[in-house]
Amino acid sequence: MVKRLYDIVLLFKEYFVVALFLLVSTALLTFSDTPQIRTLRAYSVVAVGLLQDAFSIFPNYFDLRRENAALRSMNLTLADEVSRLREGRLENIRLRSLLGLKERAEHRYIAANVVAKNLQLLRNTITLDVGSNDSVKVNMPIVNEAGLVGKVIMVGSSYCIGQTLLHVDLRVSAKVQRSRVDGILRWDRARTLTLQNVARTYDVTPGDVVITSDYSPFFPEGIRIGVVAETRPIPGSLFQAVDVTPAVDFPSLEEVFVMQYLLDSSRVFLERSAR
């Protein structure tokens, strides 16, 4: 063992000598108090400080990667939380509006969610998550806080199909709220509805509000339908076409109410008998 240690010392004797000289030099510099040594110490401290300041501008690469990963994870978490809070706020606004409608209403309402939409064809419909188990019946009106959406045309036990105003087969008896001019409202397969059977001499102007009239057998009077966008004379006719912008934004429709209102069967029987 001793011989092996001796061989190692002989093999690296130059390094041992240099290390010894360094130790001696360091000891002399440390314990010596001559003016030259003090000056050298001062310059050494300044040089080391300058080197530390210079290298401090280069951050640790691995620390930055860990910090960046943590910040990215936190950012994703916060973004998801903000998205959920925003969605909750919008839902709260919609539900408060619907609740206000329900509190002001004279009829009973059944709250429903729109679970499917078909808004790309001539017969636009919506699917609601209420049905006969919830007392929903065919021909009951569908409304939201903005106004009239349509009416129920098919009912299952837990779901029902609603016919929207944007349906070529739906006709609504309506009137202008200000001037009480009435007509038949239908979808003209464009972005607006059309109030028909309105004479040119009748007082209808853009901006007038259109509501359901008491002549309708399916809808109670006074439900907001939309606003008059434009009036156009029909060539060769005594009537004018009244374009109505719907109050309901159908593409963004999510929550609605089914109004428990059905047509009066005795009235319908009398009206049909008189024809």
Image (cartoon, rainbow, N blue to C red):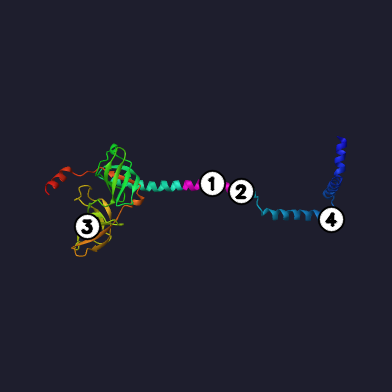
* Lower sequence index among marks 4 and 1: 4
Q: Amino acid type of disc 1?
A: Met
Q: Which residue matches tag 2?
A: 65
Q: Amino acid at mark 3?
A: Gln
Distance in Å between CA atoms under marks 3 and 1: 58 Å
The mark found on residue 196 in the picture is: 3
Q: Position of residue 162 (x, y in %)?
A: 29, 46
Q: Secondary structure at mark 3?
A: strand
Which circle's residue, 3 or 4, is located before the other in the chain? 4
- Horizontal and vertical percent for residue 273? 12, 46
List the residue tagged with mark 1: 74
Mark 1 lies on a secondary structure that is helix
Closer mark to the observer between disc 3 and disc 2: 3
* Closer to viewer: mark 4 or mark 2: 2
Q: Label 4 vs label 1: CA separation? A: 56 Å
**Left or right position of 173 against 270:** right
Label 4 sits on a secondary structure element that is helix
Q: Pointer 1: residues within 10 angstroms few (<14), some, or many (20+)?
A: few
Q: Amino acid at mark 4?
A: Gln
For this rendering, which residue is in front, 233 or 230? 233
Residue at mark 4: 36
Along the viewing direction, whichever of 2 and 112 lies nearer the viewer? 2
Q: Is residue 255 magenta?
A: no
Circle 2: element type: helix
Circle nearer the viewer, 3 or 1: 3
Q: Nearer the viewer, mark 3 or mark 4?
A: 3
Q: Which of pointers 3 and 2 lies earlier in the amino acid sequence?
A: 2
* Marks 4 and 1 close (CB-CB < 8 Å): no
Which is more foreground, mark 2 or mark 1?
A: 2
